[in-house]
Image: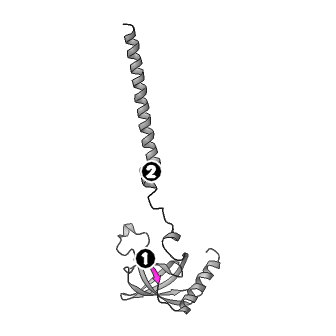
Amino acid sequence: MESTPLFLALSIGIGGAVFVGWVLFWFMNVYIKRRVGSVPESHRASAPPQQTAWEEGRSQPRLAVSWRASCRSRQGTVSAQLKDISLGGAFVVCPAPLPPGERAQILVELPDRKLLELNAMVVWSNVNLPPERTVIRGMGIRFLHNDKGQRNLLLAAITEALRSPGA
């Protein structure tokens, strides 16, 4: 009979230890999932890597600028500003972006006060996003069908902007 209280105490002790161990295991499992992410390891390898601006499929890197411009299309002419530019395209900030696929002429006021007119096509636009989801209203354009003189003038302006302080 004396072994019954000892057996009972030992059973309660072992059961309590198993319970505490299980609770700690569960807590650590939840903690690690929240810290690392809830995506299982098997799915992490197949997830596409985060792309930077240089890897978004652009053929040329863009240079941050702040050049005044105007955008002329079938809807009319609006004042705009170029926020970044490359030889292949630019981001145009304007109050009324054009829809993707629309063609336009962009008249750029270069830093040396020369005017450069470039033919472009809108490749993306945030025209249909609600204001609360839009940080800057604008559109991404690709330069199309510009002659060699226009491209050389653009190249010279970009090269000069790269050489200037703060670029």
Q: What residue is pinned by disc 2?
A: 41
Residue 36 percent location from the top left of the image? 47, 49
Specify the amino acid type for callout 1: Gly
- Splitting the image into 4 quarters, where does residue 10 fall? top left
Mark 1 or mark 2, whichever is nearer to me: 2
Residue 120 percent location from the top left of the image? 45, 85
Instruction: Confirm whether residue 111 shows in the render.
Output: no
Residue at position x 45%, y 80% in the image: 141
Q: Residues within 10 Å of mark 1 (few under 14, many from 20)?
A: many
Cα separation, mark 1 vs mark 2, equals 38 Å
The span shown in magenta is 141-146
Q: Is residue 28 above or below residue 102?
A: above
Specify the amino acid type for callout 2: Glu
Q: What residue is pinned by disc 1?
A: 138
Quadrant that contains the N terminus: top left
Q: Is residue 9 above or below residue 158?
A: above
Quadrant that contains the C terminus: bottom right
Residue 130 percent location from the top left of the image? 35, 70
Q: Is residue 67 left or right of residue 98?
A: right
Viewer-closest of 102 and 21 = 21
